[in-house]
Amino acid sequence: MNLILVLLINTTLSMILVTIAFWLPQLNIYSEKSSPYECGFDPMGSARLPFSMKFFLVAITFLLFDLEIALLLPLPWATQLNNLNLVLIMALLLISILALGLAYEWIQKGLEWVE
């Protein structure tokens, strides 16, 4: 009964807030409001800066390795399981995949910043 009451209150409150947010703002769209703020002068060039693809690839590689490390974090709690050998084999497999990925990146020169 309490769970149903909490869900009902949360749903009702969410719907009320969404309705207020939808009806409250006044939509006055005109050219000054829809143009980007440029500090009072006309832009001389594109505001977009070139993005280094090498930086992007290193960042993606870091995220992948970071995710794999995060998968290893619950290992200390795995000592409470009955079949510890299976857990250790799976952890060793994950670490070896991580090492193979690092070796591949190193061979392909994906970790070198300057070419």
Image: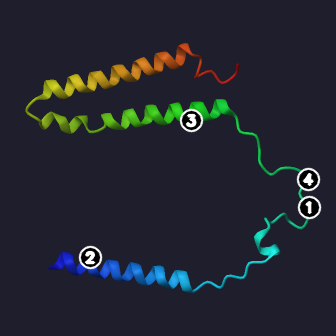
Q: Where is residue 7 drawn, in percent x and y? A: 26, 76
Residue shown at 11% from the left, 35% from the top = 81
Answer whether labels 3 and 1 touch (C-beta < 8 Å): no
- Residue 59: image tag: 3
Q: Which residue is mark 4?
A: 44
In the image shown, does 59 or 23 lie closer to the viewer? 23
Decide: is 84 above or below 44: above
Where residue 33 appears, as percent x and y from the top left, is 77, 74
Q: How far apart, in angstroms, are the residues tagged by discs 3 and 1?
A: 34 Å
Circle 3: residue type: Ala
Q: Is residue 47 left or right of residue 97?
A: right
Q: Is residue 53 left or right of residue 71?
A: right
Q: CA distance from mark 1 to mark 4?
A: 6 Å
Disc 4, SS: loop
Q: Report, in whole angstroms, how far the alpha carbon at label 2 lies from the one at label 4.
A: 54 Å
Q: Residue at x 24, y 34 (%)?
A: 75
On the image, the x and y values in percent for residue 40 come to: 89, 67
**Secondary structure under badge 1?**
loop
Report which residue position mark 1 lands on. Answer: 42
Badge 1 local density, few (<14 within 10 Å), some, or many (20+)? few
Residue highlighted by disc 2: 7
Q: Earlier in the sequence, mark 2 or mark 4?
A: 2
Three-letter amino acid code at the position of disc 1: Asp
Count of number-bearing discs: 4
State the image quarter where residue 58 is shown.
Answer: top right
Which tag, 3 or 2, sits closer to the chain's start? Answer: 2
Residue pictured at 56% horizontal, 16% vertical? 108
Q: Are marks 1 and 4 in contact (CB under 8 Å)?
A: yes
Of marks 4 and 3, which one's residue comes earlier in the chain? 4
The percent position of residue 22, horizontal first and vertical second, equals: 54, 81
For mark 4, does the 10 Å Cα neighbourhood hold few (<14), some (14 to 19), or many (20 or more) residues?
A: few
